[in-house]
């Protein structure tokens, strides 16, 4: 894992991502720069990232289509969250109703 020296922070969401956080710690990534959220906390993770962002920052979001629903996190990071339906995948009423 090559996160040290490449990223300033690691935010994970869900049980499966705990292994990612553990591997980052083992690789020497600062513990203070890792924040872990439970599966139902995608929105909170997005708000956390939003508070950290500065102009010019790059954010990589990796997730599956399982119950994590990282679209919620991304929506919170948008400058214009009201444009989520236009800018994000899986914003149809049916999909959002099952979230």
Image (tube, rainbow, N blue to C red):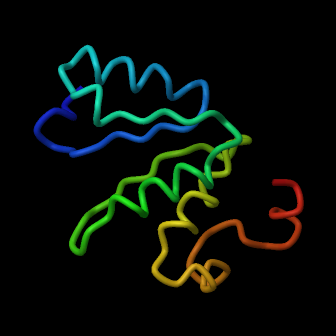
Q: Residue at horizontal 44%, vertical 52%?
A: 61
| Image quarter (top left, top right, bottom left or bottom right) of the N terminus | top left
Q: Residue at horizontal 63%, vertical 68%?
A: 89
Left or right, 13 with respect to 32, comes to right
Left or right, 96 with respect to 11, comes to right
In the image, residue 7 lies at what x, y percent?
Answer: 21, 44
Left or right, 79 with respect to 94, comes to left
Left or right, 63 with respect to 68, comes to left
Answer with the quarter of the image where residue 28 lies. top left
Q: How many marks?
A: 0
In the image, residue 76 lies at what x, y percent?
Answer: 55, 66
| Image quarter (top left, top right, bottom left or bottom right) of the C terminus | bottom right
Front-lying residue, 58 or 30: 30
Q: Residue at horizontal 42%, vertical 41%?
A: 11
Front-lying residue, 98 or 79: 79
Q: Residue at horizontal 48%, vertical 67%?
A: 77
Answer with the quarter of the image where residue 49 lies. bottom left
Q: Is residue 42 above or below residue 13?
A: below
In the image, residue 58 lies at what x, y percent?
Answer: 28, 62
Q: Is residue 10 above or below residue 17?
A: below
Front-lying residue, 93 or 77: 77
In the image, residue 70 lies at what x, y percent?
Answer: 60, 52
């Amino acid at each position: 894992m090559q996160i040290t020296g490449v990223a300033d922070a690691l935010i994970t969401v869900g049980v499966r991502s705990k292994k990612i956080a553990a591997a980052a710690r083992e690789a020497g990534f600062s513990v203070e720069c890792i924040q872990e959220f439970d599966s139902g906390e995608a929105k909170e993770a997005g708000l956390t990232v939003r508070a950290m962002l500065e102009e010019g920052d790059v954010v990589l979001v990796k997730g599956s289509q399982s119950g994590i629903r990282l679209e919620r996190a991304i929506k919170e990071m948008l400058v214009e969250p009201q444009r989520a339906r236009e800018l994000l995948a899986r914003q149809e009423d049916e999909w959002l109703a099952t979230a």
